[in-house]
Structures are given as C-alpha cells and as structure tokens.
Amino acid sequence: MKMKLTREDILSGKVIPPAWYRCRVKSVNQEQAKSDGSTNYVFQFVVNEGPYKDTPLKKWYVNEKAPGVATGFIEIMTGKEVQPDVEYDLETSVGKIIDVKVKNTEFNGRMGNDVDGFRKAS
C-alpha cells in the first residue's frame, strides 16, 4: 500500500510561532454543526510566503447563529463596511491574500495554529 503526501500534508501538523502571516484563502465550505444542526461556514487558510509557506492553519468556523464574527473578514475582503441585510458571497474570498494573526492553542493534547484575527495584506 502506498501513500503520497503533498508539502501541505506534511506541514499540517507543524506548529508555527504566534505572529501575523500572509495567507491565502484556500477554501470556504458549509458544514452542519454536530451540536444542533445549524450551519457552519468553514474557512481554510494556508501561509502564502516565508519560512512557513504552505503551512495550513486550523479551520476557522463561523456559525450562522453568530455571523457577526465574520464582519472584519468580510470588510477586508470587500473593502467596504458591512451593511445589515446584505448577502455576501463568501466564495469570492477563495484565492485572495490576507494577513492572518495566528495563536497557538491546545486541543485534545495537540498544539495547533488557530486563527486569531485578520488585517488587509499590506
């Protein structure tokens, strides 16, 4: 039996120092929350440059019950202030570059790279 790993696969468990990283929005998907069946919007970011290039960050979740969590991200992606009752197409963020603040947290005994904030890539 054979297995082929990409560079990103290999780096998926690598813990990087807390800092701001230039990242690419790799994907945006929807998943059903296990707890109550509500919708989660799931974002995946990958470091885009520097010594940690291709390192994926932990998925960032925004639940439909608390969409305001995504306000800062949407404003950076659109370049505009978020307005009430406007639908935003989250999939348009895929492939875009953004600065992501990373913090290290432990979950089930393993350290990981959590998303802790966003800013416009300068």
Image: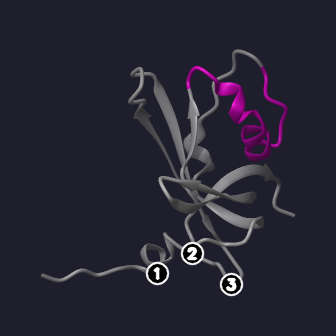
Q: Which residue appears at 57% of the width and 75% of the height?
A: 54
x, y percent for residue 118: 77, 50
Q: Is residue 119 visible?
A: yes
**Majority secondary structure in the magenta region:** helix
Work out whether 17 lies above or below 107. below
In reply to whether residue 98 is colored magenta, the answer given is no
Horizontal placement of 82 versus 37: left or right? Answer: right
Contact (Cβ within 8 Å) of mark 3 with mark 2:
no
Mark 1 and mark 3 lie on one chain; the one further toward the N terminus is 1
Mark 2 and mark 1: span between their CA atoms?
Answer: 7 Å
The residue singled out by tag 1 in the image is 7
Q: How is the image coloured?
A: one colour
The residue singled out by tag 3 in the image is 51
**What are the residue bounds of the magenta stretch?**
64-83
Horizontal placement of 5 versus 72: left or right? Answer: left
Quadrant occupied by the N terminus:
bottom left
Which amino acid type corresponds to the residue marked 1 in the rendered image? Answer: Arg
Tag on residue 54? 2
In reply to whether residue 66 is colored magenta, the answer given is yes
Work out whether 30 lies above or below 97. above
Q: Secondary structure at mark 2?
A: loop
